[in-house]
Image (spheres, rainbow, N blue to C red):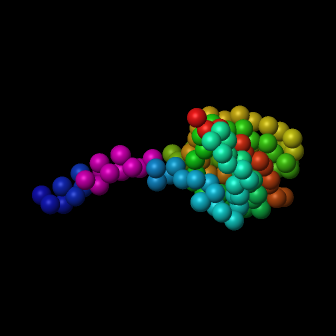
Amino acid sequence: MKTLVVFFIFVTLMLVYGKSIYAQDAAKVAPDKVKVLLENDKVRVLDFKLKPGESTGMHSHPNYVIYFLKDGKMQTTLPDGKSSEMVVKAGDTHWSEAVVHNNKNIGKSDSHAIVIELKK
């Protein structure tokens, strides 16, 4: 009976807090790869740099714009394990709704992008 109670407490905690386990700040998850350039009450600007084969780790963003400074090939993986690949060119700019994901540089050269997160 005690094991069953512990199990239900664990499941309840995972349902309540589980998303926040994945939804971590990119600058805290990968401080050697993500630097905060500017933060105020309207936006936060991040500088992302990944060498070939490097990943950011699972992290979250509110709605954001990303501007790629270098050509590259990225793999994005969601918490459910689904992934997609994207080839980008320097100067490409993309909009994204809020997301939790991991980014991996699967290209042959360093990846560099600026992310502008919008605050409410």
Q: Residue at x 87, y 45 (%)?
A: 90
Q: Is residue 66 left or right of residue 71?
A: left
Point out the stretch of residues depicted in magenta: 9-19
Query: Magenta part mainly helix, strand or loop?
Result: helix
Question: Is 7 above or below relative to 115?
Answer: below
Residue 81: x and y in percent read 54, 48
The residue most toward the bottom is 32
- Quarter holding the N terminus is bottom left
Determine if the magenta segment contains residue 10.
yes
Q: Is residue 82 left or right of residue 38?
A: left
Residue 71: x and y in percent read 86, 48
* Residue 80 in view here: yes
Question: Is 115 above or below relative to 2?
Answer: above
* Residue 75 in view here: no
Task: Please tell me in which quadrant of the rendered image residue 5 appears.
Answer: bottom left
Q: Is residue 25 left or right of residue 72?
A: left
Task: Please tell me in which quadrant of the rendered image residue 108 appears.
Answer: bottom right
Residue 111: x and y in percent read 80, 54
Q: Residue at x 71, y 34 (%)?
A: 95
Residue 36: x and y in percent read 70, 55
Determine if the magenta segment contains residue 31.
no
- State the residue in front, 7 or 29: 29
The residue most toward the front is 41
- Quarter holding the C terminus is top right
Q: Is residue 110 left or right of residue 36?
A: right
Q: Residue at x 22, y 58 (%)?
A: 6
